Image: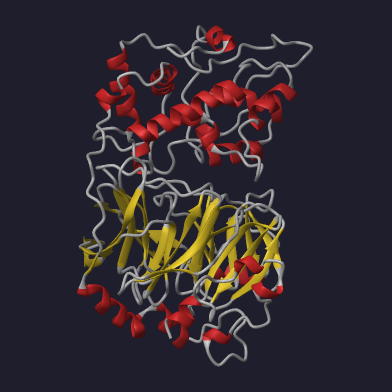
Amino acid sequence: MRSLPASLLLLLAVPACGDPASPGTDAAAHDGGITADASNPDAGPWPAFRNPVDLADLTLAQMASERLGVGTRVACDACHALTRERLQSWLVETQAADAACLGDLMPTTPAGAQAILDCFRTTDTDAWSPHLLGIYATGAASPWFDAVFDLAYGDDAEAWDDWTGRIVMPRGAQPPLTSADFDVVTEWFARGLPELEAVVPDNPDLPGCTEAIGAEVASHVTAMETTGWTAINRDAGINSLGCAGADTAAECLDTYPLSTTQPYASMWTLNAPETKIRLLRTITYTSSYWTRSSADGRFVSHGGGSTAGATVIDLLENREIPADAFYDPGFFPDNSGFVIQGGANAWCRQSLLTTSPTHIRFNEPQCSPVDVVGLYQHLGAANGGDYWTVNGQFVSDNAWGEPTAWFDEGSTDYLTPMEYTGTGYEAKAQIPVAVPYEGDTIISPSAKLLLSRVAGDGDTQSGFTLRALTATPTGDTYDVATPTIARYCVNGGKPAFSYDERWLVYHHWTTANTADVFLLELTTGVSRQITKMTAGQHAVFPHFRSDGWIYFIVKNANGGEVIAASDAALVLGS
């Protein structure tokens, strides 16, 4: 059994004081619980951090793994593959939290309580991050954490909401762990996950990647030339940023400086000297998780950049708008709406952004809740039909390095059709789709394609799978078919479709400390590297705007971050 801090052993004898609550519920509200101060360190009994569980190792492992979602229960596995490697990674994070942050479980001063909570902030964004708590994130709204918050922050509900919104697991519609659940799960981790191999099956030896591109791909791309969102938005007169006076999309953004005229000459394209990169904006903060932009390219959003939690950048008006959300922005392909996860009513009409707001609080009349859509969502829309999202098992990618591919046999995507009623977005019944050993699934702008990263040996990726998505209305829902139509044997993170659905763009770590953007043509499978970063520079989170320009962000570029745009798809596809 792994040794525990002396202060934790002392508190194990104290009974628990209630169930952890999920963020966004009344039960999770910070109630100003137990107080303590330096002059009176015994001002009140501290709730237990956790309670000991007297069970045999195998029984404990069976109960804990089942509660996390191994087997038939849907819990943490709705977002994370519960492979042996994933659980062991959580064990390492939990042990690190014990060693670095939880040596004193009865702080007696506000400074002591603040030090505990600050220990769970990342050094780059200064935001709380669940990976710094390990398995303790499943109890991060417990009475013990509430008491620590009360000592550190008093009755500051805003700080508590930020904590629970970012940290508490599991997310979404999955029920939180009760105090008894938390005791069982944390006891298993405290013992070092005994009997892990007995209760969690190992992924089988998965076949390697064999590239195959069906005839359906070319047929789809041909159809999208006239019916995809590039053509629809062009015909609707949607004007992309920087295109005034331009005869073609390739001539847009000509007022923005070229990468070759700035101190970022290393950003020049590789093997494609006929293409160019425009620098749209330098930001002085560290962005958090992925960056996405509106169909017209005017608005760019990501986590970080403001005390509110997230930022929307208006490139036309040259200003940054704080947003009371966390990360995972998305924009609908018809330029009508957007979402940023963590907002109280996270799904908003894009008209909110065109009113030049100084702060987005998600209580505006243009915003509404859609509570069934989980993290890592991606958006599409059927022309003349419903809006669509997809979410499922994912691997967090915050530009830490080449993402793993921890996906298991039970991996399931959840498709959510929704409509805009005139006053808000309203979801229809979610549709589960089994995608064994695949995850990080995205949906194309037309909502007619799905693309997933595929698990390989260990934690490595084994290419991408492309599926057609055929949705036939049946009453208030749909019958869905998702046949595989292509396999691509290249690896990378955060893929995105072009609006004409001819291209796929993704980032890939070409060395341990260098990330570049790659462009893949769906009909041929040919992939080309379109940036050339130097060591320490990371071109990541590429995505398209409607007219074919590729936006991406370069981290650690001469001490800052740069939002850039490439015309590679426009030039190489002409």
In this view, the residue in front, 402 or 475, is: 402
- The x, y position of residue 21, in whole percent, is 48, 31
- The x, y position of residue 83, in whole percent, is 32, 35
- The x, y position of residue 399, in whole percent, is 54, 51
Quarter the C terminus occupies: bottom left
Residue placed at 65% from the left, 52% from the top?
A: 286
Report the number of numbered marks.
0
- Say if residue 549 shows up in the picture: yes
Quarter the N terminus occupies: top left
Note whether 329 is above or below 148 in the view shown: below
Instruction: Answer with the quarter of the image where residue 504 lies.
Output: bottom left
- The x, y position of residue 69, in whole percent, is 32, 34
What residue occupies the far front of the structure in this picture?
271
Is residue 497 toward the left or the right of residue 223 in the image?
A: right
- Say if residue 346 shows up in the picture: no
Note whether 413 is above or below 273 in the view shown: above
Residue placed at 49% from the left, 15% from the top?
A: 16
Is residue 77 toward the left or the right of residue 186 in the image?
A: left
Residue placed at 56% from the left, 13% from the top?
A: 5
Note whether 457 is above or below 528 in the view shown: above
| Type of colouring | secondary structure
What residue occupies the far right of the structure in this picture?
39
Instruction: Answer with the quarter of the image where residue 301 lies.
Output: bottom right
